[in-house]
């Protein structure tokens, strides 16, 4: 039956992770997969999450199925984090929020839904490059064609806003634009507030459909700052999709916890959208994973835990700023390594694109045990005080020789 099944497409993140896991050297530095690491290079568990798990254990909640669309308290609280607790879209019941299997699953459910909506199903999906590697396959999977434009100007280390605007001006009415609201993966280069305002105006004029991917809220400026773009678009009256992941900002990657939000023009439409999403979830995975949602709800329900979570997020942000600055200092000030390393200071969030060639990144892994994607994308939280000099030395030697 399966003899003629071809091999699947390679996944650079998966290949890198396998390589890193197989390297047992104490010198190993993992700047690959996008998980927030603490100063001991461990996948960081938040104190608020620890406290929440303890409270859940004491309640002995059992293992019954959740409601198909996710625990109602969970999705409401998730919506308040993303849109703001007094958001008009929540008050007017124009917002439909359902749990997804983390951010990826939320994007899939929302994309599947759009692929069945008459007014959107034949539209193209626009993705800025370089992009998170999953967008194209996720949208292709449900039948959409993906168009690409340049998101990032690698020479200047900033968003190529002109390229985005020209994609907007050439896109047919109703086209779907994937927008990362903050902490762009893989570049760490976000639009400025003014650029978001210009973009909103241009998209409104062209009647384009925004599809927000919100995977890093709280790791850029602040919880509210990082939601600026999405809130601006909702205040301007767009109908839109926003997919929210709790993997990074709660550090609960393996629990697969996220939410798909759809903003409709009125509450009747939102009710029907809810029914459609409920059916798709029922047919695809029947009911959402409970544990991650319980962790998040327990924190968001308790003001002191919410406060603890929010202040921990701010320390995580601070760590990312310090790690960027330390590596910059070690490369530029101490070693005078050739090249322009200012992206380390100008980008935000978990990621940054170092100006390295695929050949140089391969040598960094194979010879120096310093691992990153071939594109030069690094997970900034992999840098810590005990490895920053080693990383800088390795980069310096490789840049000078290869
Ligand atoms: N969107 C972006 C841009 C991401 O980087 C990720 C994860 O790396 C996701 C969505 C989805 O994450 P998850 O499915 O773990 O919630």
Image: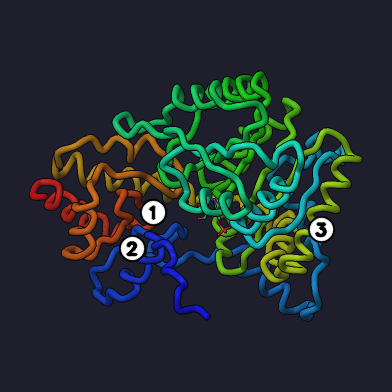
Q: Which label belongs to residue 30?
A: 2
The percent coordinates of residue 249 (x first, y second) are 57, 54
Q: Residues within 10 Å of mark 2 (few under 14, many from 20)?
A: many
Q: Is residue 233 visible?
A: yes
Q: Secondary structure at mark 1?
A: strand
Query: Of the numbered discs in the image, which one, if any, rests on residue 278?
Result: 3
Image location (x, y in percent) of residue 303: 74, 54
Q: Is residue 32 above or below residue 50?
A: above
Mark 3 near mark 1, Cβ–Cβ under 8 Å?
Answer: no
Mark 3–mark 1 Cα distance, whole angstroms, equals: 36 Å
- Give coordinates of residue 342: x percent, y percent: 29, 35
* Residue 225 in view in this figure: no
Q: Position of residue 34 (x, y in %)?
A: 44, 57
> Which of the numbered marks, if any, corresponds to residue 379?
1
User: Given the current orientation, which residue lies at the most extreme right position?
Assistant: 268
Residue 38, relative to residue 182: is it above or below?
below
Say if disc 3 is inside 8 Å of ligand 1: no
Q: Secondary structure at mark 2?
A: strand
Are the residues flagged by discs 1 and 2 in contact, CB closer than 8 Å?
Answer: yes
Task: Tell me how many marks there are.
Answer: 3
């Amino acid at each position: 039956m399966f003899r003629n099944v071809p091999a699947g497409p390679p996944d650079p993140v998966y290949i890198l992770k396998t390589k890193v896991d197989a390297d047992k050297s104490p010198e190993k530095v993992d700047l690959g997969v996008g998980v927030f690491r603490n100063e001991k290079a461990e996948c960081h568990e938040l104190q608020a999450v620890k406290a929440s798990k303890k409270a859940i254990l004491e309640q002995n909640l059992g293992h019954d199925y959740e409601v198909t669309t996710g625990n109602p308290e969970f999705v409401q609280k998730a919506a308040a984090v993303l849109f703001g607790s007094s958001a008009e879209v929540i008050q007017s019941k124009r917002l439909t929020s359902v749990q997804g299997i983390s951010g990826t699953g939320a994007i899939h459910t929302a994309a599947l839904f759009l692929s069945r909506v008459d007014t959107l199903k034949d539209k193209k999906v626009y993705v800025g490059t370089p992009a998170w590697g999953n967008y194209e396959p996720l949208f292709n999977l449900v039948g959409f064609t993906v168009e690409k434009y340049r998101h990032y100007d690698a020479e200047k280390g900033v968003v190529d806003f002109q390229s985005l605007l020209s994609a907007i001006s050439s896109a047919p009415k109703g086209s779907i634009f994937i927008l990362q609201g903050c902490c762009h993966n893989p570049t760490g280069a976000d639009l400025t507030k003014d650029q978001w305002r210009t973009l909103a105006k241009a998209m409104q004029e062209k009647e384009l459909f925004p599809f927000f991917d919100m995977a890093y809220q709280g790791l850029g400026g602040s919880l509210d700052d990082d939601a600026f773009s999405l809130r601006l678009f909702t205040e301007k009256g767009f109908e839109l999709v926003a997919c929210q992941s709790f993997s990074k900002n709660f550090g609960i990657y393996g629990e697969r916890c996220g939410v798909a939000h759809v903003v409709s023009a009125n509450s009747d439409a939102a009710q029907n959208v809810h029914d459609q999403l409920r059916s798709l979830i029922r047919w695809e995975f029947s009911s959402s994973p409970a544990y991650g949602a319980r962790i998040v709800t327990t924190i968001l329900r308790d003001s002191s835990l919410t406060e603890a979570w929010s202040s921990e997020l701010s320390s995580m942000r601070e760590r990312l700023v310090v790690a960027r600055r330390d590596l910059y200092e070690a490369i530029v000030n101490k070693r005078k390594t050739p090249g322009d390393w200012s992206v380390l200071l100008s980008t935000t969030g978990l990621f940054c694109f170092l100006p390295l060639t695929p050949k140089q990144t391969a040598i960094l892994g194979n010879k120096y045990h310093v691992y990153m994607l071939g594109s030069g994308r690094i997970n900034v939280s992999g840098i810590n005080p005990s490895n920053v000099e080693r990383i800088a030395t390795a980069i310096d030697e490789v840049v000078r020789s290869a």
